[in-house]
DNA sequence: AACACCGTTTCAGAGTGTGAAATGCATGGA
DNA sequence: TCCATGCATTTCACACTCTGAAACGGTGTT
């Protein structure tokens, strides 16, 4: 397979360098089938996957050894155990927000040109899990992915702190007072904090006007709210050069666009969540016998 | 942490004839770690699993090829996708009822000696997914696991039909009228059906008195009700020789025991469900950075 | 610039997964 | 009762696939 001339990697993403591990792919197929039907026989799996039966039995025993499946009584079939939740319980918070939000932040950047970012609350800060600063032709910053942003000074942080539940806000404030974080230096001005939060709450978005400290950039952000859990799942915002945009434009165009994106993301998340939990209650039962 | 996958043989069950497939066990470990943390680096996985880094990258690429993971932007880490729900969405209905109910039906058989059974509604019948007839010293029948039982004549079936929601009952009755099923021959006596259902509903359990047809056995059953979804998840019942038990004993001892078991199973199911869905919202965030 | 760290790639070799064929093990019909 | 049938399971020799030490290359730090 050795090429003697240089081959350019495809686009930005490199081609996978490894061949996928065969047995792993097969085991995932088997586990998927196990999940589709309540109780499955080796033969059913064989028909659904075209895998040789010995292979199926071997993989099933492997899944059993790992605790994700059990053999039904008197060898009539196999089924999954409650432990399978370990394999999907992590699809919450950051991963869900990123997967649901990516198309929306890209759309924002296409339309407004400025970079957008999505951040997820994590203790005493928010963590940026996605930015479109690579897609934006004129990004004020280069790359702040995985950066922890302060909950007071940064719009993405404040959009969380101002709009989360009162109890959550109280606990987070305690955390802010008892640990070091990006905004630790602002903690001695309690009046300032309350003012910023209430201003955000009234205006329905949070804003940082640049030029104050040593920032040439400004930003606005709004929360992504899950109404079924009463929880701020993430925040989404855009950043721009302070001198390049008039405030009127921000309030009348940028903020509504952000709120529309947040609403769209919220709907996607609700859909993904309900699919994960319930769903297929009907599709699941094509009368297994 | 867990590295040696040496499994001890399990008690009465036969020892697994195959050696578990190594790469599969490892991939499941990796997927589990991916789920425990929002975004993970290869190094973090390495520290948590003790797997060699090339192996981790290979398995991650395999998971990516299968669609269960994606590489976070600019190579800073990996995370799961919404597709992981495929690997656990099946733990509902039958598997959950069986896993939660098994200890209770065994307890019933230990105490009352008669065999107990758990059945799950499936279209126009209920399917027996677990029985303790192997544990019972005096079982009237031999093995009816995976058998489809009628919703009218059998206590396990009637406990579902009588106690499910009115809308579900209406749809199921339509299904019973338009398909063949174990009780097809009873469908021409509509008065009988309504009477059986209302009697069950009043008495809070369903009962079949043997000797009527050609049965020497009788049975009682109760529904396992999920209050959060307003849904009968399964039914649990016991079977006995008609002539061996006085009716007083059934009403005063058997039925209360069954109802206690149903309540216990319901609680276990609620616990399992909430663990699967939410949970770990806090434990999940040991500040990943 | 030099260093340190980390993700990724390479590659040769051995251990491991593979699946056709054979063997059990039920159930059901004659 | 005794085969016939269908399915789950086991065996086993071989090919091949997975393995992981070592090397590489990129990025951020001193």
Image (spheres, coloured by chain):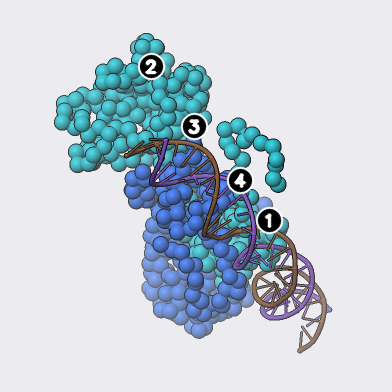
Chain colours: A cyan, B blue, C purple, D brown
Quadrant hosting residue A165: top left
Q: Is residue A119 left or right of residue A10?
A: left
Q: N-terminal of the two: label 2 or label 4?
A: 4
- Callout 4 environment at 10 Å: few (<14), some (14 to 19), or many (20+)? few
Identify the residue position indicated by label 3 in the image: A102
Q: N-terminal of the two: label 4 or label 1?
A: 4
- Callout 2 environment at 10 Å: few (<14), some (14 to 19), or many (20+)? some
Q: Secondary structure at mark 3?
A: helix
Q: Name above or below for residue B121 compared with residue B215.
A: above
- Callout 1 environment at 10 Å: few (<14), some (14 to 19), or many (20+)? some
Q: Name above or below for residue A13 compared with residue B115.
A: above
Whole-percent x, y for residue A19 in the image: 63, 50
Q: Residue at x 20, y 29 (%)?
A: A186
| Badge nearest the viewer, 1 or 3 | 3
Identify the residue position indicated by label 1 in the image: A49
Whole-percent x, y for residue B13 in the image: 54, 77
Q: Residue at x 39, y 12 (%)?
A: A245
- Callout 3 environment at 10 Å: few (<14), some (14 to 19), or many (20+)? some
Residue B143 showing in the rendered view:
yes
Q: CA distance from mark 1 to mark 2?
A: 55 Å
Identify the residue position indicated by label 4 in the image: A17
Q: N-terminal of the two: label 1 or label 2?
A: 1
Q: Secondary structure at mark 1?
A: helix
Q: Secondary structure at mark 4?
A: loop
| Badge nearest the viewer, 1 or 2 | 2
| Badge nearest the viewer, 4 or 1 | 4
Q: Which mark is residue A280?
A: none
Q: N-terminal of the two: label 4 or label 3?
A: 4
Identify the residue position indicated by label 2 in the image: A241
Q: Nearer the viewer, residue B100 or A200?
A: A200
- Image mark 3: chain: A
């Amino acid at each position: 397979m050795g090429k003697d001339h240089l081959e350019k990697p495809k686009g930005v993403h490199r081609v996978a360098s490894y061949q996928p591990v065969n047995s792993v792919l097969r085991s995932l197929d088997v586990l998927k089938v196990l999940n589709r039907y309540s109780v499955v026989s080796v033969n059913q799996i064989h028909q659904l996957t075209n895998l040789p039966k010995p292979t199926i039995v071997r993989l099933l025993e492997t899944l059993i050894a790992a605790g994700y499946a059990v053999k039904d009584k008197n060898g009539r079939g196999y089924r999954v155990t409650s432990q399978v939740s370990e394999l999907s319980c992590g699809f919450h918070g950051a991963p869900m927000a990123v997967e649901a939000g990516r198309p929306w932040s890209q759309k924002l950047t296409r339309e407004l040109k400025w970079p957008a970012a999505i951040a997820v609350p994590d203790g005493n800060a928010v963590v940026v899990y996605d930015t479109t600063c690579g897609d934006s032709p004129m990004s004020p910053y280069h790359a702040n992915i995985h950066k922890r942003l302060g909950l007071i000074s940064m719009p993405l942080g404040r959009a969380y702190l101002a709009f989360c539940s009162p109890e959550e806000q109280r606990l987070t404030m305690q955390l802010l007072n008892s640990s070091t974080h990006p905004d630790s230096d602002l903690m001695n001005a309690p009046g300032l904090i309350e003012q910023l939060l209430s201003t955000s709450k009234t205006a329905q978005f949070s804003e940082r006007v640049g030029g104050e400290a040593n920032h040439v950039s400004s930003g606005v952000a709004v929360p992504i709210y899950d109404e079924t859990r009463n929880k701020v799942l993430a925040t989404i915002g855009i950043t721009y050069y302070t001198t390049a945009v008039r405030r009127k434009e921000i309030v009348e165009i940028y903020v509504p666009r952000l709120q529309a994106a947040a609403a769209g993301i919220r709907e996607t998340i609700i859909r993904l969540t309900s699919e994960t939990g319930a769903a297929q209650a009907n599709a699941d039962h094509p009368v297994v016998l």
